[in-house]
Image (spheres, rainbow, N blue to C red):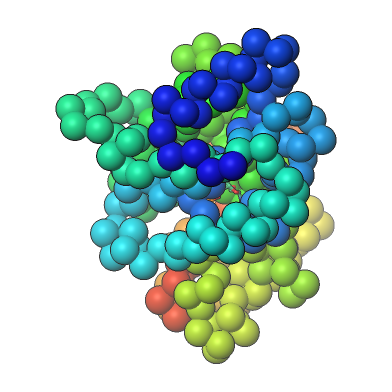
């Protein structure tokens, strides 16, 4: 069932709630792959009803070219979701989500500021705003998010705490290709040569994490990872950071749970990844 309007979505969701059913929402921007489906499958197990949203949210794109080139394939998405299966696909238009007169932004500091927040100004305000809206629209009890976007997951966890949003946020493992590359809708934009080099991102940060656990200096291990990536043909390493896993503040305290996060460009495509340290 594909639903386009908030009114129709709400009518169905209200009936589910009235019947005492729990609702899980899986927010996506479409161009679905196994990573997205793993979230939907988890929701299927844990909730009575599953809604997958497909909405390429213009407010979270700081780069108009990236928005224009973002892959869209609703027909294929529908087929993939029927294998889970989900109860509803909510795929609204931009005007439905942001009608004339829309002026509210959920704006966050702290965990939303470094790394992706720094490289992509306005990105997390766009994410926080649309996630707040999707939670409100779907009457969701649980929201499913991928660890692939670790900083986004921390932003959403913080958001529901700060605004008392009655949604349980569930973080799901990153699904990878056989060679280690994290699945991403943007991977289809890679050239054959770029696709061949792309797994070096995960390999390099994995090696750095191993070295750090073995007692090597954080900085040295990170520098080596960046070198490995440049040598493999990445044209730009935007950041490789070792951070407190929750606050995302810089952390040299190896007793805390830490996360290594990275962003880099290969053949004109920006890739991100992260791993526990
Ligand atoms: P997106 O469509 O890229 O906005 O992603 C929608 C949701 O799927 C987000 O919560 C992502 O973190 C999650 N996701 C994307 N790729 C993966 C992956 N490879 N493994 C697990 N979750 C993912």
List x then y, in percent, for residue 26: 61, 39
Nearer to the camera, 44 or 203: 44
User: Is residue 14 depicted above or below 241 in this figure?
Assistant: above
The answer to which of 4 and 135 lies nearer the viewer is 4
Is 247 left, or right, of 183 in this rendering? left
Q: Residue furthest left?
A: 101
Residue 125 shows in the view: no
214 lies above or below 247: below
Q: Position of residue 79 (x, y in %)?
A: 65, 59
Name the one closer to the observer, 252 or 106. 106
Left or right of 177 on screen, residue 66: left
* Residue 273 position by quadrant: bottom right
Location of residue 164 with respect to 42 vertically, above or below? above
Q: Which quadrant of the view contains residue 151?
A: top right
Residue name at image x 47 percent, y 15 percent = 163
Residue 101 lies, in percent from the top left, at 17, 27
Q: Residue at x 61, y 17 (%)?
A: 15
Residue 218: % across, % down: 64, 55
Q: How many marks?
A: 0
- Does the image show residue 269? yes
Q: Quadrant of residue 221?
A: bottom right
Q: Which of the image's four quarters has the N terminus?
A: top right
Residue 111 lies left or right of residue 166; in this view the side is left
Q: Residue at x 48, y 75 (%)?
A: 189
Instruction: Please give the name of the residue rendered at 62% of the width and 84% of the height, measured from the top-left corner.
Output: 196
Q: Residue furthest bottom?
A: 193
């Amino acid at each position: 069932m594909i639903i386009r309007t908030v009114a129709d979505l709400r009518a169905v969701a209200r009936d589910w709630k009235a019947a005492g059913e729990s609702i899980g929402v899986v927010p996506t921007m479409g161009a679905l792959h196994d990573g997205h489906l793993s979230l939907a499958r988890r929701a299927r197990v844990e909730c009575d009803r599953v809604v997958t949203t497909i909405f390429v949210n213009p407010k979270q794109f700081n780069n108009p070219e990236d928005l224009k080139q973002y892959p869209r394939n609703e027909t294929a998405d529908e087929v993939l979701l029927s294998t889970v299966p989900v109860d509803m696909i909510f795929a609204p238009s931009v005007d439905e989500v942001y009608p004339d007169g829309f002026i509210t932004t959920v704006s966050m500091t702290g965990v939303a500021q470094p790394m992706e927040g720094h490289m992509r100004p306005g990105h997390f305000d766009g994410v926080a705003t649309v996630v707040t809206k999707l939670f409100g629209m779907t009457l969701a009890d649980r929201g499913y998010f991928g660890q692939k976007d670790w900083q986004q997951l921390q932003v959403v966890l913080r958001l529901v705490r700060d605004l008392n949003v009655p949604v349980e946020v569930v973080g799901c493992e990153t699904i990878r290709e056989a060679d280690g590359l994290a699945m991403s809708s943007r991977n289809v934009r890679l050239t054959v040569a770029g696709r061949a080099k792309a797994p070096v991102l995960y390999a390099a940060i994995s090696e750095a994490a191993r070295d750090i656990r073995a007692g090597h200096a954080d900085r040295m291990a990170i520098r080596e990872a960046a070198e490995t990536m440049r040598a493999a043909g990445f044209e730009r390493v935007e950041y490789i950071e070792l951070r407190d896993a929750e606050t995302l503040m810089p952390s040299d305290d190896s007793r805390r749970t830490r996360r290594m996060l990275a962003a880099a460009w290969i053949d004109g495509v920006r890739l991100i990844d992260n791993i526990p340290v």
